[in-house]
Image (cartoon, rainbow, N blue to C red):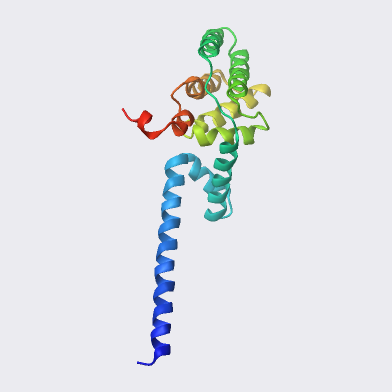
């Protein structure tokens, strides 16, 4: 066989191996995003024109989150917010509309103290989705109900649902061993 034929075969083999490696890398990256973001991955995929753009958007969220200085609450702040939450929940019985509005404000106060920027709601939700993907859909739903409440367009059952959703996020925001804290700890301290 002529030398040029061997060269063509070698180049073809390198291209094939490169394509397989690239495909494996993309597949691994996709699985990582799906595991990291859960249902939020599917939401991003549904909102984007292509899978590539959705994944790029999720990667941008992670990069933005890495630039933020998110910190756990001090124990005194955590206790104060927990007490305020109990008062907000108790107020639901007498004034559900006001309780939902208070819950939304309380969530934002905790976020601010933790270091999350309070830009527009979508940006806030995107930032939270990196650290709290399991409850971000709850937050979006609670916010939608809160907006409907502002327009006097939410039933008491809707408001109860909003409080349940807010409570799920609130509990995660108050946690000291939350996902974002565990990510910055050395591996040996995370075991056990």
Percent x, y for residue 94? 57, 7
Q: Is residue 152 above or below residue 130?
A: above
Residue 153 image point, x, y percent: 64, 24
User: How many numbered circles does the render carry?
Assistant: 0
Residue 76: percent from the left, percent from the top? Answer: 53, 10
Pick the front one: 171 or 76:
76
Q: Residue at x 49, y 45 (%)?
A: 42
Residue 179: x %, y % from top left: 45, 30
- Using the rendered image of the protein, determine whether residue 38 is visible from the camera's viewpoint: no
Q: Quadrant of the N terminus?
A: bottom left
Which residue is at 43% across, 83% downward?
8
Judging depth in this view, the residue of 41 and 12 nearest the camera is: 12
The quarter holding residue 17 reads bottom left
Q: Hey, which quadrant is residue 88 in on the image?
A: top right
Relative to 124, is 152 above or below? Answer: above
Residue at the left extreme, as displayed: 192
Q: Residue at x 60, y 21 (%)?
A: 113
Residue 180 can be seen in this image = yes
The answer to whether residue 72 is left or right of residue 11 is right
Question: In screen coordinates, is 24 left or right of 98?
Answer: left
Quick one: quadrant of the C terminus? top left
- Report whether 117 appears left or right of 28: right
Residue at point 58%, 33% (across, down): 125
């Amino acid at each position: 066989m002529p030398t040029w034929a061997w060269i063509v075969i070698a180049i073809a083999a390198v291209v094939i191996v490169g394509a397989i490696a690239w495909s494996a890398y993309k597949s691994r990256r996709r699985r990582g995003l799906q595991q990291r973001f859960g249902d939020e991955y599917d939401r991003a995929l549904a909102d984007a024109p292509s899978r590539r753009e959705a994944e790029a958007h999720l990667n941008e969220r992670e990069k933005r989150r890495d630039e933020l200085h998110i910190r756990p609450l001090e124990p005194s702040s955590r206790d104060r917010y927990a007490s305020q939450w109990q008062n907000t929940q108790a107020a639901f019985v007498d004034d559900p509309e006001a309780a939902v509005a208070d819950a939304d404000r309380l969530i934002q106060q905790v976020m601010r103290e933790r270091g999350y920027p309070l830009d527009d709601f979508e940006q806030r939700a995107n930032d939270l989705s990196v650290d709290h993907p399991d409850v971000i859909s709850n937050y979006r739903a609670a916010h939608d109900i809160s907006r409907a409440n502002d327009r006097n367009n939410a039933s008491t059952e809707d408001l109860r649902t909003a409080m349940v959703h807010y409570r799920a996020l609130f509990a995660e925001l108050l946690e000291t061993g939350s996902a974002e804290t565990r990510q910055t700890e050395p591996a040996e301290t995370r075991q056990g």
